[in-house]
């Protein structure tokens, strides 16, 4: 029997890049061999990772950065941008027959309607699609993320910089599953 339950959630997950945790670390040496790293990474299937629209490598923060006296942007200011971007999405989908509330819910049909691409954007995403590890599902995920980046910047049209940034958020596709 197959059952479908309503579920909408946001998954936030973390993992080490290798068993010792220091692969690609700028300050510490990794003790793992390439086969050990591949075996460790292969515990998470490529098809599962393909369904996660944003996955990035977050390097360790060095001491100087950690002790910096530079004031980071306040969470209140960030919240204002998030609320503005979410409102933009609600406005965009207000006339849609389906109840959509955010870009992540867009189907391929919605993506074609709401993510119009210039010739430069088309070339950029086509070039990315020829790279190993980027599937059709990843293509749609890139466009959803690019649309969200443009909303965050309060820009109506997707530009090459939005596409490029969204592609960069698929770093694990290229690193481990290509």
Image (tube, rainbow, N blue to C red):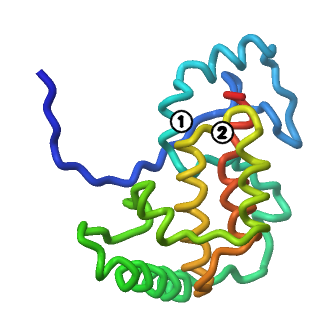
Disc number for residue 49: 1
Dot 2 crowding, Cα within 10 Å, few <14, some 14–19, many 20+ = some
| Picture coordinates of residue 85, whole percent (x, y) | 48, 81
Left-right relation of 36 to 48: right
Q: Residue at x 65, y 75 (%)?
A: 158
Residue lying farthest top? 35
Quarter of the C terminus within the rendering: top right
Dot 1 crowding, Cα within 10 Å, few <14, some 14–19, many 20+ = some
- Name the residue carrying label 2: 134
Q: Residue at x 70, y 54 (%)?
A: 167
| Front-most of residues 176 and 20 | 176
| Picture coordinates of residue 93, whole percent (x, y) | 35, 77
Quarter of the N terminus within the rendering: top left
Q: Nearer the viewer, mark 2 or mark 1?
A: 2
Dots 2, 1 in contact, CB < 8 A: no
| Front-most of residues 131 and 10 | 131
Classify mark 1: helix, strand or loop. helix
| Picture coordinates of residue 152, whole percent (x, y) | 57, 79
Q: Earlier in the sequence, mark 2 or mark 1?
A: 1
Q: Quadrant of residue 92?
A: bottom left
| Front-most of residues 33 and 65 | 33
84 over 59 or under it: above or below:
below
**Spatial separation of the CA atoms under disc 2 and disc 1:** 11 Å
Q: Quadrant of residue 29?
A: top right
| Picture coordinates of residue 97, whole percent (x, y) | 24, 71
Classify mark 2: helix, strand or loop. loop
Figure disc tally: 2
Q: Residue at x 78, y 81 (%)?
A: 70
Left-right relation of 37 to 49: right
Left-right relation of 154 to 31: left
Left-right relation of 128 to 117: right
Q: Quadrant of residue 30?
A: top right
């Amino acid at each position: 029997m197959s059952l479908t339950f309503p579920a909408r959630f946001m998954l936030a997950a973390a993992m080490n890049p290798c068993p010792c945790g220091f692969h690609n670390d700028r300050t510490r040496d990794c003790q793992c061999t390439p086969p050990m790293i591949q075996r460790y990474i292969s515990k998470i299937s490529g098809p599962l990772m393909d369904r996660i629209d944003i996955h990035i490598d977050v390097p360790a923060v060095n001491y100087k950065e950690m002790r910096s006296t530079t004031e980071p942007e306040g969470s209140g200011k960030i919240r204002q941008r998030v609320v503005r971007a979410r409102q933009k999405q609600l406005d965009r989908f207000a006339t849609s027959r389906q109840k959509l509330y955010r870009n992540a819910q867009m189907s391929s049909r919605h993506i074609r309607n709401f993510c119009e691409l210039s010739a430069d954007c088309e070339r950029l995403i086509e070039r990315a699609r020829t790279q190993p590890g980027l599937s059709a599902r990843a293509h749609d995920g890139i466009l959803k993320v690019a649309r969200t980046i443009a909303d965050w910047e309060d820009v109506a049209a997707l530009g090459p910089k939005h596409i490029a940034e969204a592609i960069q958020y698929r770093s694990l596709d290229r690193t481990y599953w290509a």
